[in-house]
Image (cartoon, coloured by chain):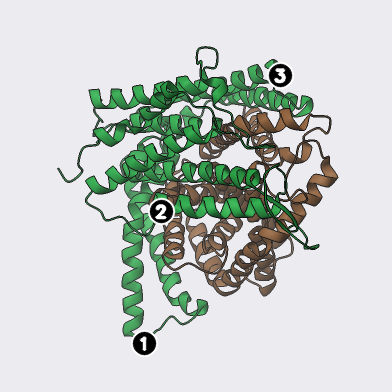
Chain colours: A green, B brown
Amino acid sequence: MINTWAWCGWLLAGLVALSLTRNPTYLVIIFLSITLVSTVLVRRAGARRGFFSPLYFLGFICLTASLFNALTSHFGNTILFAIPGQIPLLSGAVTLEAMTYGALNGLVLSGLFVIFMVFNQALPARALVRLIPRAFSPLAVVISIAVTFIPATRRELELIREAQAVRGHRVRGVRDALPLFMPLLVGGLERAFQLAEAMTARGFGGEGEAAAHAFRGRFAMLAGLLLILAGWLLKLVTGSSPLWAGILITAGAALILAVFVLISSRSVSTTYQTESWSVRDGIVLAGAALVLVVFLVPSISPWHFMQNYNPYPQITLPSFNPWAGCAILGLLLPAFLVVSVSK
Amino acid sequence: MEMRNRWLSIAIYTVSIGLGVLTFVYPFILPGAVGAQSMSTAHASETPLLYVLLLTLCLGVLLYEVQGEAVKTRQVALLGVLVAIDSVLRFVDIAIPGPGGFSPIFFLIILTGVVFGGRFGFLMGALTLFVSALITGGVGPWLPGQMFTAGWTGMCAALCRPVIEGLHLSGKKTEIWLLMGVGAFWGLAFGAIMNLWAWPFMVGPVDQYWAPGVGLQDTLRRYGVYYLATSLAWDLSRSVGNVLLIGIFGAPTLKALRRFERRLVFWYETPGQDEKQPELLGEKI
């Protein structure tokens, strides 16, 4: 298994890449890399590909977005045909540029959807719960309880359904679900009280948690929020991205994150199973870092100006730099490195 | 000290919710004197990321503030189990999809907010969306927005409490009618708010989509047209679903939740004082 944090780095790199480029050549490379990782994950897990396939999804979304944009947006120089008459929205020229723009949006949307699908495939729910910062320990406990109780609740629902069926109850409409839902709710609430007593007996909810909710940390968070608000308002008022707005937002975000890190570091927790960090994880993270450098550091990235592409008003071939294309392949690395779950 | 804490808490709630609202509604308040080309370029590149980051930060601060009031063991256990039940309802909805935007999760979020208060309702809404996203593979950039909006649903439902208590509506038909109204409203509002996270980044007919520099009135009109054309039917089924579920399940669910709420409260007598003092496990708003 690849380390959770390495997957997080990979996800971040993919999101940044998908958000910052509209160049179709790079978008296709990103999408194919993500899809290949998804395919390998499904094969290694021994699962069969379900109804949902990233390529089918891409085809459907691109086609829909392309058609929708072509039929409703009548800009562009390359006219394919025209819809005559006075039909609202639809009448007018159908252009190649509008189709291309719609397809590009579909490609980005599909990429965003599929990259999160891969992230969900790669990591079990317990790994995602473990990502919750320790500053949120009470909420992490709530989430752990919920995740643990979900299978039990589903079993309980099935048992109640069978018991009611034995009594002749059939669910034909929403109203018939009441005899299933109420025992489930009341049984769940009873279990919550038993659980609470067990947790109290083990010392949960003592002064430690209350003390962690310190005044100074909360005050610093408020200051961080106010800095972000000031920066955001400055950005909205001026309508551009002035340096000061960026500085204020970054400072506010950094302050809030620093408080969370500080509170997390002070929070005592017991770790039963530590995730190991291997060379494999380092390689995945390095690949993600390479993608981030290409997309986020314009001053040192010679390919920055090739990322943007606009088909309007006249469609042109997108520019492509093979070195940038190779760097984006950093997203493909997990496909070679994932270890079979079955092993 | 207590008063200082209270003021700080109010300030954090106000600023984080205000910033969250601002993050959703910024397309309506962008200035008119902006060059369309420069703005759309900036918009396409950095704003979506900024949007998700800001919303996540606001949500983080708000959740941290709310959880500080909810560390009591019984509340934690109760919330965990209620979130599990609501997540199973969403799982059932995914397995057997309802019509349009119908989702069975909102009625329990609303009823929980009414019975246990705004903070509990906010946590119930936000965590239900989070946990159900974990188990159904629904984690994505849309999640912070969904958590925020579902949290608001639970928080706003608590505003009915003073009305219900003031007019002695508890256990009466009128209470259910009132909550059905809340369910109907949030069925539409959830969709209208969640549309906002994607609407500014979409392209389409000029009279339906966001464009920089068109002014508040025109932006509202465009959003109204877009909402009517693409979302109203979808959201109406959620709204009608909420009304139906609250109408059918509301009274017995409220009764059960209130019975367990009374078990969260205990009374103690201070020696020398006649008056009994209620000790609540968690403050309500």
Residue position for label 2: B136
* Rendered-image quadrant of the C terminus of chain A: top left
Q: Residue at the bottom extreme? A: A168
Circle 2 packing at 10 Å, graded few (<14), some (14-19), many (20+), is some
Q: Chain of mark 3?
A: A
Q: Nearer the viewer, mark 3 or mark 1?
A: 3
| Alpha carbons under labels 3 and 1: distance apart | 69 Å
Circle 2 — which element? helix
Label 1: element kind: loop
Of residue A287 and residue A151, the one placed in the foreground of this image is A287
Determine the residue positioned at 59% across, 50% down: A66
Is residue A48 positioned above or below A200 on the image?
A: below
Is any atom of residue B272 visible in this view? no
- Residue B135: percent from the left, percent from the top? 38, 52
Residue receiving disc 1: A168
Picture quarter containing residue A78? top right
* Front of the two marks 2 and 1: 2
Q: Residue A242 bears which disc, if any?
A: 3
Badge 2 and badge 1 both on one subunit: no
* Residue A68 locus on image (x, y percent): 63, 54
Q: Which chain is home to disc 1?
A: A
Residue A171 vs residue A214, the one in the foreground: A171
Left-right relation of A220 to B167: left
Picture coordinates of residue B139, whole percent (x, y): 45, 45
- Say which amino acid is labelled 3: Pro
Pointers 2 and 3 in contact (C-beta within 8 Å): no
